[in-house]
Image: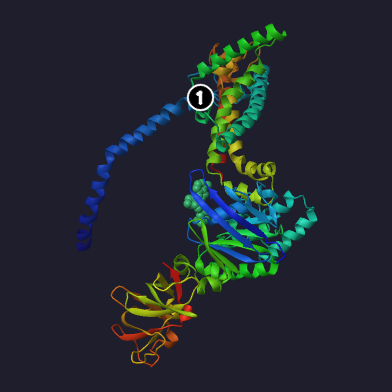
């Protein structure tokens, strides 16, 4: 009795006082986080849940089904759009990874005039509103096609080609940014060690620089792939007739009403994107 | 002699863009098979000198010769030298065996020969069995040895080492010093060794070049550098020295007499070009001085003083002895004989006589 009486008054008020002082801040911060998550993820969660809803009606949960997913993979238009998306993503990723990596290397290794200006200009596609980028690319293609037609008699059309070029244009700066981050903590004495051991410049790049940059390059590639697969605005403006990607297909369907198939399609796209971004983040962390 | 130096620097200077003069008119000749050290404080231009020999930096002026051939703008991969970097610079994405094999792979040596020489090189540095480890799975000392094996496997004419033991703890460093020296004698390759640790340089080198502020101050064997420092900097940087400032009053063959503070005459080793009346500094090492009780004056230059401080450091005892109001000297006496020659202990305040062999005191021009 006497022991509890002497120890309790010493510890209890301290503990309660501290917790009391923290409380308002703690409350605001936590509710803030909660709200953010709610806003961000509630729609996505709802979308995924309703892609498994046995009813065609959106708002009412009837029962679990994977019917919409089955319908989706049997739908030829969906398959065609997915194929287009994949082709565009693969080609644009390959090209923008090469260009982005070379750009990062050039910016890291060489000093040249107007380098800062060039660097700023390169990052522009990252910050310019997508709609502006989309329209400028549209105008660019139109003008070029007109000129080519007039001078060389070449007739070119909008389609997979223009979409791919547009995707390269907006995704290579992202690759460059990721690779440059990797280059920033690159130990140059490793390259000197290679040269010291008899490796010429190409061998040094091939056997030392490239393997060490590879995690960064792959991370950049995954990012480029994700951007390409998900892109809507730029693709929409530069697609022409007949060339449809997954996001365009989803948009086309939504105009005829939100159906469970659209939910299923979106869920798949979402899953793919999350996987790709996760892969990219993990690679960037790798030492 | 007819044989050419392995590495020769002729009036080499390096001025960086920011107009820092890192290396200032350095000339050196390094003989085949020699263990040659560049010794000096941090920032004195050792690394820059080494990097110019390796080909990572080009001299602003002067010329570097390797095996008698001027290097000019020859890139690093065409020079018959290899470097062991201070941080080892092992390739993190390659195993130990792959790291060691790198040089031979670049030269397209046949596979079975590479395998055989990798095995030999790893045995040489006592790392057999570590082939499949990655550098991050090795201790500092092991990484160090991989770096050595990676360089030595190429059988370079010259091996350049930039403070290769700098990152190791003291005990391991001592071990590796002996190991390195032994290795160098086994393989017979010329070593150019950069260090700021004077003890390390004295232990390992055949010859040492002492550098300061981009210049080479003195080149010589460890004995020459230690016993015959030619400048105050060298006398101070390598080992310990007392510096006594005074004026030359007598020249007598092998010996000069320098008067400290116009009062105390001390003997020192004669040197060319000294004149009576000249202002000089006498450098004498603490362990060269003998302490004796007073009353045993001899004519050959004993100096009287009073002990101000006694510091016991285990193997030795230091005595701080005041000669004049402005001048004190440190005396180091081994503790196997920590008593006066007469057998009495020396305490603070004791009157003592200091003497030394004049040969061991160097005269440095002011
Ligand atoms: N790349 C460089 N650019 C400009 N100054 C340099 C460069 N490398 C070295 N220095 C300068 O040259 C001097 C000598 O450097 P260094 O050769 O590294 O000395 P040490 O190896 O003896 O410590 C230092 O003052 C250093 O700051
Ligand atoms: Mg250095």
Decide if residue B72 is in sight here.
Answer: yes
Give coordinates of residue B222: x percent, y percent: 55, 71
Of the pair A28 and B137, the residue shown nearer to us: B137
Position of B276 with respect to A68 (left or right) is left
Position of A108 with respect to B315 (left or right) is right
Q: Which SS class for mark 1? A: helix
Of the pair B253 and B333, the residue shown nearer to us: B253
Q: What is the crowding at mark 1: few (fewer than 14 residues within 10 Å), some, or many (at least 20)?
A: some
Q: Is residue B331 above or below residue A81?
A: below
Residue at x 55%, y 49% (from the top left corner): B14
Decide if residue A49 is in sight here.
Answer: no
Q: Give the farthest residue toward the top.
A: A150
- Asked if disc 1 is less than 8 Å from ligand 1, the answer is no
Quadrant for the N terminus of chain A, please: bottom left
Q: Check the image and tell me how it is coloured.
A: rainbow
Q: In this view, does A201 lie above or below A124?
A: below
Question: What is the tally of numbered marks visible in this picture?
Answer: 1
Task: Give the quadrant of residue A246.
Answer: top right
Residue at x 72%, y 49% (from the top left corner): B106
Of the pair B167 and B155, the residue shown nearer to us: B155
Of the pair A275 and B356, the residue shown nearer to us: B356
Residue at x 51%, y 24% (from the top left corner): A124
Position of B62 with respect to B357 (left or right) is right
Judging from the image, mark 1 belongs to the subunit labelled: A
Q: Is residue B28 above or below residue B238?
A: above
Q: Give the farthest residue toward the front.
A: B276
Give coordinates of residue A216: x percent, y percent: 58, 38
Give coordinates of residue A57: x percent, y percent: 52, 17
Give coordinates of residue B261: x percent, y percent: 32, 74
Residue ID for mark 1: A124
Task: Give the quadrant of residue B259.
Answer: bottom left
Q: In this view, does B161 lie above or below B203?
A: above
């Amino acid at each position: 009795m006497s022991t509890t009486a002497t120890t309790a008054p010493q510890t209890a008020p301290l503990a309660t006082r501290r917790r009391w002082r923290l409380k308002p801040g703690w409350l605001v911060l936590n509710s803030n986080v909660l709200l953010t998550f709610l806003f961000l993820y509630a729609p996505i969660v709802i979308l995924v849940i309703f892609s498994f809803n046995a009813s065609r009606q959106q708002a009412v949960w009837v029962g679990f089904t994977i019917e919409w997913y089955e319908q989706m993979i049997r739908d030829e238009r969906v398959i065609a759009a997915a194929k287009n998306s994949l082709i565009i993503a693969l080609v644009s990723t390959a090209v923008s990874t090469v260009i982005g990596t070379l750009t990062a290397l050039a910016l890291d290794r060489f000093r040249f005039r107007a380098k800062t200006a060039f660097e700023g200009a390169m990052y522009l596609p990252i910050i310019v509103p997508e709609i502006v980028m989309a329209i400028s690319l549209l105008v660019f293609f139109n003008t070029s096609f007109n000129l080519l037609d007039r001078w060389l008699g070449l007739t070119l059309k909008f389609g997979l080609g223009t979409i791919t070029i547009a995707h390269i244009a907006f995704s290579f700066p992202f690759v460059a940014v990721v690779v440059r981050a990797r280059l920033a903590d690159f130990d140059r004495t490793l390259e000197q060690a290679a040269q010291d051991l008899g490796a010429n410049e190409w061998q040094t790049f091939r056997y030392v620089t490239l393997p060490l940059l590879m995690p960064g390059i792959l991370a950049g590639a995954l990012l480029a792939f994700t951007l390409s697969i998900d892109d809507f605005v730029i693709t929409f403006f530069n697609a022409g007739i007949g060339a449809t990607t997954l996001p365009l297909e989803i948009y086309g369907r939504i105009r005829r009403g939100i159906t469970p198939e659209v939910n299923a399609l979106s869920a798949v796209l979402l899953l793919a994107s999350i996987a790709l971004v996760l892969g990219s983040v993990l690679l960037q962390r790798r030492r | 002699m007819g044989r050419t130096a392995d590495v020769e620097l002729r009036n080499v200077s390096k001025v960086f863009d920011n107009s820092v003069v890192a290396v200032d008119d350095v000339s050196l000749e390094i003989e085949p098979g020699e263990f040659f050290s560049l010794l000096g404080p941090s920032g004195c231009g050792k690394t820059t000198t080494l990097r110019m020999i390796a080909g990572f930096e080009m001299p602003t002026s002067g010329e570097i010769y390797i095996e008698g051939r001027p290097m000019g703008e020859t890139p690093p991969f065409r020079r018959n030298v290899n470097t062991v970097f201070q941080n080892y610079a092992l390739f993190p994405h390659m195993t130990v065996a792959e790291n060691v094999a790198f040089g031979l792979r670049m030269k397209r040596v046949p596979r079975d020969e590479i395998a055989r020489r990798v095995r030999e090189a790893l045995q040489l540095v006592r790392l057999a069995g570590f082939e499949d480890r990655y550098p991050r799975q090795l201790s500092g000392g092991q990484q160090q040895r991989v770096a050595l094996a990676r360089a030595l496997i190429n059988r370079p004419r010259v091996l350049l080492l930039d403070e290769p033991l700098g990152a190791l703890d003291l005990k391991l460093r001592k071990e590796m010093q002996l190991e390195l020296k032994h290795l160098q004698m086994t393989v017979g390759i010329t070593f150019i060794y950069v260090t700021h640790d004077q003890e390390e340089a004295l232990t390992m080198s055949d010859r040492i070049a002492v550098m300061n502020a981009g210049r080479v101050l003195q080149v010589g064997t460890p004995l020459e550098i230690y016993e015959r420092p030619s400048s105050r900097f060298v006398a101070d940087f390598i080992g310990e020295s007392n510096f006594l400032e005074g004026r030359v009053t007598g020249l007598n063959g092998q010996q000069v007499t320098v008067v400290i503070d116009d009062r105390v005459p001390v003997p020192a080793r004669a040197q060319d070009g000294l004149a009576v009346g000249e202002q000089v500094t006498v450098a004498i090492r603490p362990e060269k001085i003998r302490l004796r009780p007073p009353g045993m004056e001899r004519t050959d230059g004993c100096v009287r003083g009073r002990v101000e401080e006694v510091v016991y450091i285990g193997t030795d005892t230091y005595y701080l002895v005041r000669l004049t109001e402005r001048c004190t000297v440190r005396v180091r006496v081994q503790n196997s004989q920590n008593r006066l020659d007469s057998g009495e202990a020396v305490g603070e305040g004791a009157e003592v006589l200091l003497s030394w062999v004049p040969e061991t005191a160097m005269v440095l021009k002011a």
